[in-house]
Amino acid sequence: MRDEMFSAERGRGAALNDRRIQVSQINSLNQAMVCTGFPYDLPGRVEATRLMADFVVNGQAVRRDGSAALDLAYVAGGRFEGFWEIGLRPWDVAAGVLMVEEAGGRVTNFKGQPFDIYHPPILASNGFVHEQMLATLAV
Protein backbone atom coordinates (compact mmCIF):
# COMPACT_ATOMS: atom_id res chain seq x y z
CA MET A 1 0.00 0.00 0.00
CA ARG A 2 2.84 2.41 0.83
CA ASP A 3 5.48 0.76 -1.36
CA GLU A 4 7.62 0.10 1.70
CA MET A 5 9.76 -2.94 2.37
CA PHE A 6 11.40 -3.18 5.78
CA SER A 7 14.26 -5.63 6.21
CA ALA A 8 17.05 -6.53 8.62
CA GLU A 9 19.93 -8.93 8.84
CA ARG A 10 21.75 -9.75 12.07
CA GLY A 11 24.96 -7.72 12.19
CA ARG A 12 24.18 -5.86 8.96
CA GLY A 13 21.60 -3.30 10.04
CA ALA A 14 17.98 -2.57 9.18
CA ALA A 15 16.63 -0.95 6.05
CA LEU A 16 13.55 0.52 4.43
CA ASN A 17 13.56 0.06 0.66
CA ASP A 18 17.31 -0.64 0.77
CA ARG A 19 18.08 2.58 2.70
CA ARG A 20 19.52 2.10 6.17
CA ILE A 21 17.20 3.11 9.02
CA GLN A 22 17.77 3.93 12.67
CA VAL A 23 15.66 4.62 15.72
CA SER A 24 14.68 8.16 16.67
CA GLN A 25 16.73 10.31 19.03
CA ILE A 26 13.79 11.46 21.20
CA ASN A 27 14.86 10.98 24.82
CA SER A 28 11.79 12.06 26.79
CA LEU A 29 8.64 9.96 27.08
CA ASN A 30 6.46 13.06 27.19
CA GLN A 31 7.73 13.89 23.69
CA ALA A 32 7.48 10.31 22.45
CA MET A 33 4.98 8.72 20.10
CA VAL A 34 4.31 5.19 21.32
CA CYS A 35 2.12 2.38 20.06
CA THR A 36 0.48 -0.79 21.29
CA GLY A 37 -2.09 -3.42 20.48
CA PHE A 38 -4.73 -5.36 22.36
CA PRO A 39 -4.87 -9.10 22.96
CA TYR A 40 -7.93 -11.17 22.08
CA ASP A 41 -8.60 -12.47 25.60
CA LEU A 42 -10.71 -10.34 27.95
CA PRO A 43 -8.31 -10.27 30.95
CA GLY A 44 -5.49 -9.22 28.62
CA ARG A 45 -7.62 -6.44 27.12
CA VAL A 46 -8.40 -5.07 30.57
CA GLU A 47 -4.68 -4.93 31.45
CA ALA A 48 -3.78 -3.48 28.03
CA THR A 49 -6.39 -0.74 28.46
CA ARG A 50 -4.97 0.19 31.88
CA LEU A 51 -1.46 0.37 30.45
CA MET A 52 -2.61 2.45 27.51
CA ALA A 53 -4.19 4.97 29.89
CA ASP A 54 -0.88 5.25 31.76
CA PHE A 55 0.94 6.00 28.50
CA VAL A 56 -1.71 8.52 27.42
CA VAL A 57 -0.90 10.44 30.60
CA ASN A 58 2.91 10.03 30.39
CA GLY A 59 3.60 10.12 26.65
CA GLN A 60 2.97 12.58 23.86
CA ALA A 61 0.63 10.28 21.94
CA VAL A 62 -0.44 6.64 21.74
CA ARG A 63 -1.32 4.90 18.49
CA ARG A 64 -2.80 1.51 17.66
CA ASP A 65 -2.16 0.31 14.13
CA GLY A 66 -3.26 -3.31 14.43
CA SER A 67 0.03 -4.96 13.42
CA ALA A 68 2.81 -5.67 15.89
CA ALA A 69 5.21 -6.35 13.01
CA LEU A 70 4.51 -2.95 11.47
CA ASP A 71 4.68 -1.20 14.86
CA LEU A 72 8.13 -2.70 15.46
CA ALA A 73 9.26 -1.68 11.98
CA TYR A 74 8.08 1.86 12.71
CA VAL A 75 10.09 1.92 15.96
CA ALA A 76 13.13 0.74 13.97
CA GLY A 77 12.57 3.46 11.40
CA GLY A 78 12.12 6.25 13.94
CA ARG A 79 8.41 6.83 13.33
CA PHE A 80 7.56 5.68 16.86
CA GLU A 81 9.76 5.85 19.94
CA GLY A 82 8.30 2.80 21.64
CA PHE A 83 5.99 -0.20 21.45
CA TRP A 84 4.61 -2.53 24.11
CA GLU A 85 2.12 -5.36 24.02
CA ILE A 86 1.07 -8.45 25.93
CA GLY A 87 0.02 -11.81 24.52
CA LEU A 88 1.81 -11.84 21.17
CA ARG A 89 3.08 -14.94 19.37
CA PRO A 90 6.61 -15.52 18.03
CA TRP A 91 5.51 -14.94 14.42
CA ASP A 92 4.13 -11.53 15.42
CA VAL A 93 7.45 -10.23 16.72
CA ALA A 94 10.48 -12.23 15.53
CA ALA A 95 11.35 -10.14 12.47
CA GLY A 96 10.41 -6.84 14.14
CA VAL A 97 12.64 -7.50 17.15
CA LEU A 98 15.60 -8.00 14.82
CA MET A 99 14.76 -4.77 12.98
CA VAL A 100 14.61 -2.73 16.20
CA GLU A 101 17.87 -4.15 17.49
CA GLU A 102 19.65 -3.66 14.16
CA ALA A 103 18.38 -0.07 13.97
CA GLY A 104 19.92 0.72 17.37
CA GLY A 105 16.91 0.17 19.61
CA ARG A 106 16.32 -1.94 22.68
CA VAL A 107 13.91 -4.85 23.24
CA THR A 108 13.09 -6.40 26.63
CA ASN A 109 10.20 -7.80 28.61
CA PHE A 110 8.29 -5.55 31.01
CA LYS A 111 10.89 -6.18 33.73
CA GLY A 112 13.81 -5.00 31.60
CA GLN A 113 15.10 -8.53 31.09
CA PRO A 114 16.16 -9.91 27.70
CA PHE A 115 13.14 -10.54 25.49
CA ASP A 116 12.24 -14.10 24.55
CA ILE A 117 9.90 -14.45 21.56
CA TYR A 118 8.20 -17.39 23.31
CA HIS A 119 7.42 -15.46 26.49
CA PRO A 120 5.60 -12.16 26.03
CA PRO A 121 5.14 -9.34 26.96
CA ILE A 122 7.37 -7.17 24.81
CA LEU A 123 8.73 -3.66 25.20
CA ALA A 124 10.67 -2.20 22.26
CA SER A 125 12.01 1.32 22.11
CA ASN A 126 14.58 3.62 20.61
CA GLY A 127 16.58 2.93 23.79
CA PHE A 128 16.45 6.53 24.98
CA VAL A 129 12.92 6.25 26.44
CA HIS A 130 13.17 2.60 27.47
CA GLU A 131 13.69 3.15 31.20
CA GLN A 132 10.84 5.68 31.27
CA MET A 133 8.58 3.18 29.53
CA LEU A 134 9.60 0.44 31.99
CA ALA A 135 8.69 2.78 34.86
CA THR A 136 5.28 3.46 33.32
CA LEU A 137 4.67 -0.27 32.85
CA ALA A 138 5.60 -0.92 36.49
CA VAL A 139 2.91 1.42 37.88
Image: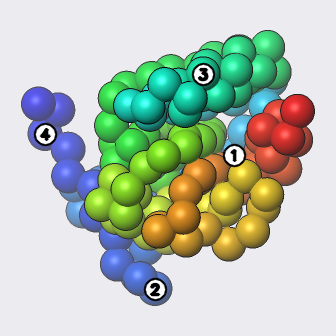
Q: Which numbered disc, 1 or 3, marks the residue that appears first in the sequence?
A: 1
Foreground residue among 76 and 42? 42
Foreground residue among 47 and 77? 47
Tag of residue 46: 3
Q: Which type of secondary structure does the marked residue at label 4 adopt?
A: loop
- The Cα atoms of the two marked residues, 2 and 3, are separated by 38 Å
Q: State whether residue 124 is above or below residue 119.
A: above
- Mark 1 sits on what residue? 25
Query: Residue, x 34% and y 78% (percent of image)?
Result: 9
Residue 112 shown left or right of residue 47 in the figure: right
Are the residues at dot 4 and dot 2 in contact (C-beta closer than 8 Å)? no
- Mark 4 sits on what residue? 3
In the rendered structure, which amino acid carries the disc numbered 1? Gln
Q: Which type of secondary structure does the marked residue at label 1 adopt?
A: loop
Query: Residue, x 66% and y 62% (percent of image)?
Result: 108
- Mark 2 sits on what residue? 11
